[in-house]
Image: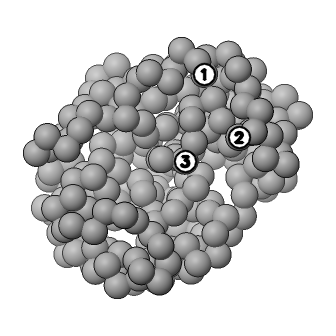
Amino acid sequence: MQSPDLERVNGILKEKAEKFAIFARLLSEYNQKFNLTAITDGVEVEIKHFFDSLAGEGYIPAGARAAEVGSGAGFPSVPILIAREDVHFTLIESTGKKCNFLRIVKEELGLNADIVCGRAEELARTAQFREAFDVVVARAVAPLNTLAEYCLPLVRVGGEMIAYKAGEEEIAGAQRAIALLGGGNVRAATYELPRGMGARALIFAEKRKRTPQQYPRGHGKERSAPLA
């Protein structure tokens, strides 16, 4: 699969520099209070958070209704929202203080987003959220087989899950889980972060058929007994 357009990423960072500066300030200001990120150096924040998040921006269709599972401090959703006013994001986060931070960021930056304080595995069993999104993204949340059980029930048939990972290694062990959940056509787009800050991969899974009603299982089973 074609790798991300990293020149485009650099262009977005320059074009939207003012908004990214505001976001960086908010991260720094609220990090200690809300326990948002262990990465605090300005250059590392720009590359490991902003640049990395934007690597997936070009794969999101125009006008998409997107969701993010385990938003945390808002990566990759907030950088993508800064770049793409046409995309609407639902940010799903279970920790109240991080939800509060995301609400502050939404207000300060005027983002096209909804903040939902809840668990993806519970929301995915409701009519409002189940199979409601064109794209569902997640970054640094869980192993791929667990992540698929969180994400794919939220994706409409014909939509896609995009997982931000350090590499492609988890794909083989997650193929069966993805298929059980209605997914397929699993593939990866790899890239290198600037300044030698590491290799990364975007893992894509297409939603080919509806997720069986028993998934997600809930009660922590996605993590304690992942599909294999």
Question: Quarter of the image containing the N terminus?
Answer: top left
Image quadrant in which you'd find residue 46: bottom left
Q: Which residue is mark 3?
A: 141
> Which residue is drawn at the image coordinates 27% and 52% (left, top)?
48
| CB atoms of marks 1 and 2 within 8 Å | no
- SS type, badge 2: helix
Q: Position of residue 204 (x, y in %)?
A: 48, 28
Q: Earlier in the sequence, mark 1 or mark 2?
A: 1
The label nearer to you, 1 versus 2, is 2
Can residue 84 be spotted in the picture? no
| Residue 174 badge | 1
Residue type at tag 3: Val
Relative to 148, say whether 121 is above or below: below
Query: How dense is the environment of label 2, judged by Cα within 10 Å: few (below 14), some, or many (20 and up)?
Result: some
CA–CA distance in space, label 3 to label 1? 15 Å
Q: Nearer the viewer, residue 220 or 126?
A: 220
Residue type at tag 2: Arg
Can residue 37 be spotted in the picture? yes
